[in-house]
């Protein structure tokens, strides 16, 4: 860092924090989920947290950082779990949390500032118009919409709408570029892909326009099976029921539900795998009728039938699903970790069976059924009973060999966490919107090292990261 | 008919009509669509039209008919096109059109009397709550919800929600049985299948509870292609876009759009096949971005971009789709007829290509993309340049041989129009709810002739039909 004092003077009037303890707190996310990332990123910290209150203040911050050559790492709520929001080269942590207004609500559409918490957006859209966001991560109650668009992929609602990457699931993104004179761009249509899931490496998202779906009082249901694969087959069939409106559909293998879902434990036996369902209230009857066709299905909980006593203290099922399964697991057993797997259509059930057979209780299954390219298939977040990095790597290789691509959650770069190749559109946009490479350095390998060999299968080490050690 | 006079006395106070000209009018539907049905059913008429105003009057009518052994054929708006609503044994035509109240609107749910017109239901649900029916036939502006549930299968909205047969697309059906003392049953869950698409052969539907979806100001778009198969491939890909909310997605082969869609003709060349799209207003940008990926796609019309002048007099695209394509064709060229085909997933595009090659302009293609068992595939309503019944039969056999099952629209029985087998659930329910077989006689072969051989491939001739000739 060259001249922090000068930068601060330029930002006079904008809320700032430079207490090292507090700055370090705001320089972390849920990277510690991964034993691999925990070891490598634990020391990372920024120099200064800046909390703009509106777009003009964002522009002032960016202009000043550009002038002084100070890196900027945007931050929403810091719930990302790949270290995405961690300032690998130090500099400014740009905290968007103060920009949290819902700007506009129309039929099918909400416009919100980047720092708005998703649950809060839904409270407003529900109250005003009976609508809610199509998609939200299981960190609904804490995460920001800007962080979701920049760092997330999908989650609750993906059984109906696919993921953030799908055209139409993000209508517009307002982006401030990192240039001498920052520009405000409105990306729409296919252009939103320039910044969706780009970890804020190529623009500061200041507002988003998202599609809405009708808000219902979703019913939570837990269906127990003695056999994990029977549970998976049931979920697959349920997901293919076109008339039964669901909001989430997950399968968790025994003994995880009993071991990790402590408040739901009283409904379960340890040898039961569970299907977690969010279903529209007016579809519950159809759901029940469908479920009756499966002799092995045991509906152990339904929020619409539970007494107030029974419901008390129970988290919503979306907080048992997606990465919340892992989070609850980590609380019970800090030695576990997890993976992210795609079981491609149309062989998803065979693939799940194959890896289940291969790993047994070393990798207990966790499936999230989603729409993917128009078809129902499942994405996996299996728990891994972690022994070593080598074994973890081997488990990933074995998944790949079984035709199940891994999205590695133990990497902080876009490429290594994704398709192991560079997104040419995002790279091109970074050239345009962040010519000096100040935005979230170290997260896009293609920018740092255009000749990097992804075939080598080793972990990318961002040189800047060493500098801050 | 034994004693019509006595029946009339029993029904005193309930609106009736026995003028033979008017009764014959109300004994017909769109059966004349089919040259085969036209020849066989043209003479059919009932004896008396009775128009109850509420459920109690329905019960009175049924009780009296049962006592006198008089057949009852329920009727909504008479827009069915298989002769479903035609009283093959004469007797009472039970006109439900006077029972047309919307009873209740809740989030996701509407309850309406059987005779309510679908467009009218939507007007009320839109005004009260911004909601609309998930599914409607292209006869939206004239057909009743009871007739749709009893005689239809799906249509506009099926790209999103599948068909009426899918669990959850009909929540509850209120049915009056035909017994000495008629009962009122509330069928829910899987039980709705007892009467859905049973042509009123096993109960009088007096009210239905249907799921609602959000109502949007759907944008109509027409995308033209020089090649029909390219249009089909585009539509297939568009239908698989999980984030782009559509309400209908149809493909019509050249020269039909130019020849039949007279008011849209000015946007088209005769050699262009068209994709007809209904898309949510907030998804138009994503739709446009998606369409730009297809070099051959030419967006010739979009209602949101059209001037008022251009929009004037244009029917909505849903009135170019489903059976309205055929209807518009028949107006231009009364010699044509049509078929109903399923192109099963995952080989729908190959199957379409195969039959297109086989028949050329003798059977110009018309595809309706739908969700079917969770996947996007297409259903076909190809136009047939009709020459003879023999050739029509041959065309159907050739479709079957190409792996494209036919749902024969030239038959008035449930079995021959459907899967060529009896629905055991509907038959069992008829035994219970219509023990004397008075409801819509001649439409369920299994009831009339339990030993009928469907393998014989010949047309079923209802004996009662000959009696009325
Ligand atoms: C228990 C748990 C469950 C989770 N479940 C899901 C899930 O179901 N689905 C899912 O997709 N994710 C999930 N996540 C990951 C994460 O919670 C979500 O993606 C969340 O939406 C991130 O929002 P945030 O505000 O916390 O973003 P942050 O963590 O603060 O940031 C995420 C990334 O976006 C960048 N960023 C943040 N704001 C901006 C901005 N305004 N402009 C530019 N870049 C920005 C950051 O630099 C970072 O790279 C889960 C995580 C945990 C710990
Ligand atoms: C141009 C055109 C387009 C069409 N498009 C579609 C389409 O997209 N999708 C589709 O599914 N259909 C379509 N149809 C067929 C038909 O219009 C619809 O199915 C419509 O919903 C039927 O409603 P209706 O009120 O006219 O019923 P009717 O024709 O009066 O009756 C249909 C059947 O249901 C029975 N019935 C009617 N009311 C009751 C009741 N209350 N209780 C018990 N039985 C009853 C009748 O006896 C008959 O067997 C189309 C027809 C035409 C002519």
Image (spheres, coloured by chain):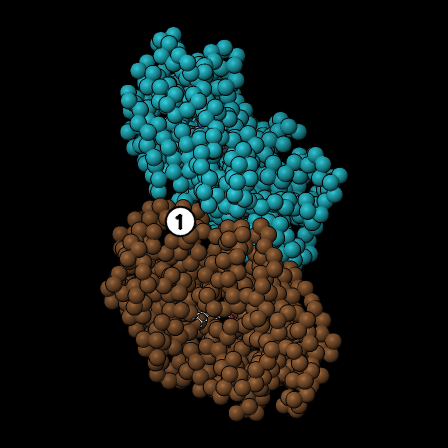
Chain colours: A brown, B cyan
**Relative vertical location of residue B378 with respect to residue A298 in this rendering, above or below:** above
Left or right: where does residue A183 sit relative to residue B23? right
Residue A265 x %, y %: 27, 65
Q: Return the chain for callout 1.
A: A
Residue at image location 50% in from the left, 69% down from the top: A143
Q: Is residue B307 above or below residue A88?
A: above
* A137 sits left or right of A256 in the view: right
- Of the pair B90 and A386, the residue shown nearer to us: A386
Image quarter hosting the N terminus of chain A: bottom right
The answer to whether residue B358 shows anywhere in this view is no
Secondary structure at numbered mark 1: helix
Q: Position of residue B326 (x, y in %)?
A: 59, 33
- Quadrant of the rendered structure where residue A94 is? bottom right
Residue beneath the point at 57% across and 66% down:
A100
In the image, is the residue at mark 1 within 8 Å of ligand 1 by its beta carbon? no
Q: Name the residue nearer the viewer: B390 or A291.
A: A291
Badge 1: residue crowd in 10 Å (few <14, some 14–19, many ≥20): some
- Above or below B190: residue A305: below
Tell me what residue is drawn at x 34 percent, y 65 percent: A252
Count of labels shown? 1
- For image coordinates 32% across by 36% down, the residue present is B425
Q: Which residue is mark 1?
A: A281
Image quarter of residue A169: bottom right
> Closest to the observer: A163 or A354?
A163
Report the front residue among B205 and B227.
B205
* Location of residue A16 in the rendering, given as x and y in whole percent from the top left corner: 59, 80
Q: Residue B184's x, y, as percent?
A: 33, 29
């Amino acid at each position: 860092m060259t001249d922090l004092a000068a930068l601060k003077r330029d930002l006079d009037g904008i809320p700032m924090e430079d207490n090292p303890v507090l700055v370090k707190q705001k320089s972390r996310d849920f990277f510690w989920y991964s034993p691999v990332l925990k070891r490598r990123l634990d020391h990372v910290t920024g120099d200064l947290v800046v909390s703009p209150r509106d777009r003009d203040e964002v522009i002032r911050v960016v202009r000043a950082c550009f002038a002084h050559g100070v890196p900027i790492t945007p931050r929403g709520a810091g719930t990302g779990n790949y270290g995405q929001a961690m300032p690998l080269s130090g500099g400014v942590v740009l905290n968007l949390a103060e920009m949290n207004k819902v700007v506009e609500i129309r039929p099918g559409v909400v416009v919100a500032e980047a720092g708005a918490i998703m649950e809060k957006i839904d409270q407003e859209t529900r109250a005003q118009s009976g609508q809610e966001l199509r998609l939200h991560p299981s960190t609904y109650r804490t995460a920001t919409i800007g962080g979701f668009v920049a760092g997330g992929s999908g989650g609750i609602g993906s059984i109906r709408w696919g993921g953030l990457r799908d055209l139409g699931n993000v209508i517009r993104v307002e982006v401030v570029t990192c240039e001498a004179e920052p520009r405000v761009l409105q990306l729409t249509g296919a252009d939103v892909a320039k910044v969706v899931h780009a970890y804020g490496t190529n623009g500061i998202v200041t507002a988003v326009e998202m599609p809405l779906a009708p808000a219902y009082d979703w019913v939570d249901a837990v269906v127990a099976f003695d056999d994990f694969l029977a549970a998976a087959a049931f979920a697959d069939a349920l997901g293919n029921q076109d008339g039964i409106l669901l909001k989430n559909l997950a399968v968790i293998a025994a003994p995880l539900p009993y071991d990790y879902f402590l408040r739901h434990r009283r409904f379960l036996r340890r040898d039961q795998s569970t299907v977690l369902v969010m279903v529209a209230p007016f579809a519950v009857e159809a759901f029940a009728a469908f479920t009756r066709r499966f002799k092995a299905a045991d509906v152990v909980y339904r929020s619409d039938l539970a007494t107030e006593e029974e419901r008390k203290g129970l988290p919503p099922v979306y907080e048992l699903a997606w990465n919340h399964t892992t989070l609850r697991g980590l609380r019970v057993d800090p030695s576990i970790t997890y993976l992210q797997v795609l079981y491609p259509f149309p062989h998803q059930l065979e693939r799940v069976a194959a890896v289940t057979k291969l790993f047994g209780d070393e990798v207990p299954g966790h499936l999230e059924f989603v729409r993917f390219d128009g078809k129902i298939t499942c994405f996996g977040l299996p728990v891994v009973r972690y022994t070593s990095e080598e074994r973890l790597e081997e488990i990933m290789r074995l998944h790949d060999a079984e035709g199940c691509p891994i999205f590695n959650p133990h990497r902080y770069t876009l490429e290594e966490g994704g398709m192991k190749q560079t997104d040419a559109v995002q790279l091109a946009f970074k050239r345009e919107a962040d010519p000096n490479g100040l935005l979230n350095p170290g997260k896009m390998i293609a920018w740092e090292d255009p000749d990097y060999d992804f075939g080598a299968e080793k972990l990318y080490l961002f040189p800047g990261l060493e500098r801050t050690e």
